[in-house]
Image: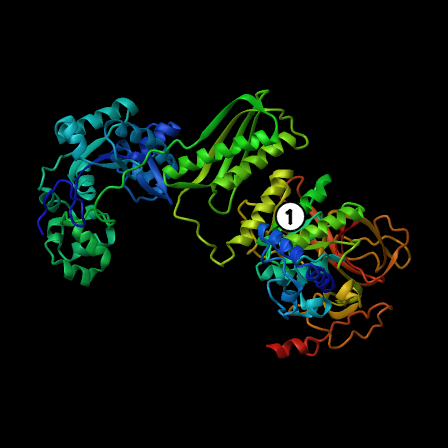
Amino acid sequence: MSVRNRPGCAGWGEAVRTIVVWCPDWPVIAAEIVDGYPAHEAVAVMHANRVLVASPAARAEGVRRGLRKREAQGRCPHLIVFEHDPGRDMRAFEPVLAAVEAIAAGVETLRPGACALAARGPARYHGGEAAAAERIVEHIAQQCDVEAQAGIAEGTFAAGLAARAGVIVPDGETAEFLSGLSITALGRPGLADLLRRLGIHTLGEFAALPGADVLGRFGFDAALAHRLAGGRLDRQAGAGLTPRRPPAELDVAETFDEPVDRVDAAAFAARALAERLHDRLGSHGLACTRLTIEAVTETGEELVRTWRHDGLLSVNAIADRLRWQLDGWLRGKGTRATGIARLRLIPEGVVEHLGLQPGLWGEAGEERDRAHRALTRVQGLLGPDAVLTAVLDGGRADRSRIRLVAWGDERIAHGDEAPWPGRLPGPSPATVYVEPIPAEVLDADGRPVRVGGRLELSGVPAQARIGAEERAVGIVGWAGPWPVDERWWADGESRRAARFQLQLADDRAVLAALRGGAWFVEALYD
Amino acid sequence: MRGTAIGSARSSVGGGAGRAAGLQVVRAAGLGGVVRTAAGRDAGETGSARTLPVLSGLRALLPGGGLRRGATIAVHTSSVLLALLAAASRAGSWCAVVGLPALSPIAAAEMGIALERLALVPNPGTEWTTIVAALLDGVDIVVAAPPGPVAPVVAGRLAARARQRGSVLMPAGAWTGADLTVAPVRGAWGGLGAGRGRLRCREMTIQARGRGAAAAPREVTLWLPALEGVLPPVTRALPADADSAPAIGAVPDVREEPAGLRRVG
């Protein structure tokens, strides 16, 4: 198959003329832009204790990619090293993308530091591919003060290599351009090493191998690489660019001439606003799973609350939430909202609307919706933190194992899989007091039972008086002390306690703890 | 319970027009699946969607062998409460607990309750009635601990709401007008000795008394919690008398105690 360029045809195996804009040593440049590290000095970006990228000054001193930190610092003692941060790279790249978008539409980010766009449009507009590339590079330099290189070839892979070389490959000569390059340009070190040992050193030599044999001998990934080497395939995903879409403006806002102070008026406004938001999302083919409601009161106070939802928010769901929230703000206790002057809905957690998926275990449906509705309604009445769901974390005491999260928030347990020596095995008490109840545990002679530093008891627990009970109750069974010595390394957080299970003569069983010389009943096995 | 259903059917049979109007109301409210005539009930469908399942050990306690939707079942003590919720929760029902900050989710999870379908409203504040009513609209089982004495009017209104929406209202503690009151009569722990062992199992006798079909008190004795499995019946009583102190260290031997449970596997 010969490499041709047919305008407008971007099918599988046919590559479009592509401009790739590449900023050399981007992690180093990004660190200078964001954190102020001097990029002109000897700088190395490390990842997993190995050099990922080095600045030109560092390269001149012999710092190479893949070196260990100690080795790199040995070669260049004044080397500045810092950790790789992909988030930082992307943040710094965002203005560059904006600068490219100012010149040409349909920009796709390849990775932080490189982006691709179709060459045809800009080339026509600016009167030639060279002029377009020059214009883009110039604009980036002006806007962002960043040095960039552009390359044009057929397909993103070849264009990326052209950008590194800073050349514009003439139409139809991509295969020739590629054939002279080293096999390492494929970005597959393992494969490159193997091919080199087989005596294949350039992409051209590799491309000359029969495709079926490459697939049979080296596997699928190598077959893809083979097609790339021949300039035939535009990346693995097939042909064509998927341009970056600028984030759409999705918020809707309404300013009321007369501040809304009645719930029915608020409900009316809520409905209209919800419909507008839904239409706007719908026109972008989107739906949201979280909704932030922002209101400004007459007095200029800002009220913000975010609602989460387990599914996609429909018009009714948006309107309901908005109405409940306004209801809560206008009528709830402890709020000072007298009238609402301005309302804004900000959709968050925006996803592409593909229709609501049923739950994996078949629980999604009417019942779940009903339950969610009722619980969200209670959240509207009492505030989102009033309806909770429990997550079991790791821990020793029952109270510290229970973590309550607001209904609708993510339920992620922490440390539950770790061993917790000192945790009492089940069965667990059904009632765990929020505040432990003070108690007295006495031995047969009526003296309080104490536990020494070596966990020896001053006497056998014989009777207990819990809380404000008048009479002490006999103890018919007990076990302990089980020591708990937690967080002794942190000032003010250390907890020491000796725990006991006590079985009382009146059929009760309790979990008691001796802490700082005082007895408490922590839980009741009722 | 069943008595009231039959009663209402009889009265509606009395006047054909009234009955048609009643059905009209029912359909209009979208309650077609919830409200049925007694004739439909008498057809002998047990274990249908009208009844939420309970653990097998507790079936004998409840008329109909489960938690009838629309019923008000007052429950005493937390462990009995959790035991009643367990099977329904595991079968996919949604539960909400209002006003019980001390109820332990750990014990709930050990009993087999799905925590992701258990909503807790520990501090409902002064709007207790509103909250419970709102939850009855959407949640299958609403456990509600009243902050104080509840006026009979309010109690009746909440019970009516539960009946209308097909939810189960489960007041924690005494409740006037409850269809059924479930309370432990006695319990004896085993596993704890003098300075050794740990609490492992309890033999518990639970009694249910109520109105209508449940007028005669029913009792079951079971292990709650059990050494293994969930609520196996007591096949061998602890050697201690019910009213004397339970014998120390009376842990039933694992090999002989849950014999009834073994056979199931």
Tell me which corner region of the image, top left, top right, bottom left or bottom right, holds residue B83. bottom right
**What amino acid is labelled 1 in the image?**
Leu
- The residue nearer to you, when weighing B257 against A372, is A372
Q: In the shown orientation, is residue A317 left or right of residue A336?
A: left
What colour scheme governs how the chains and residues are painted in the rendered image of this protein? rainbow
Q: In the shown orientation, is residue B201 left or right of residue A357?
A: right
Crowdedness of circle 1 by 10 Å Cα count: few (<14), some, many (20+)?
many
Query: Whole-percent x and y of residue A140?
Result: 26, 26
Tell me which corner region of the image, top left, top right, bottom left or bottom right, holds residue A451. bottom right
Query: Whole-percent x and y of residue B203?
Result: 76, 69
Q: How many marks?
A: 1
Q: Secondary structure at mark 1?
A: helix
Q: Which residue lies under the disc numbered 1?
A: B135
Whether residue A174 is visible here, answered yes or no, is: yes
- The residue nearer to you, when weighing A256 against B262, is A256
Q: Is residue B61 above or below residue A235?
A: below
Query: Whole-percent x and y of residue B183?
Result: 78, 61
Query: Whole-percent x and y of residue B40?
Result: 63, 66
> In the rendered view of the protein, which quadrant contains the C terminus of chain A?
bottom right
- The residue nearer to you, when weighing A86 against B81, is B81
Whether residue A165 is visible here, answered yes or no, is: no
Q: In the shown orientation, is residue A71 left or right of residue B115?
A: left
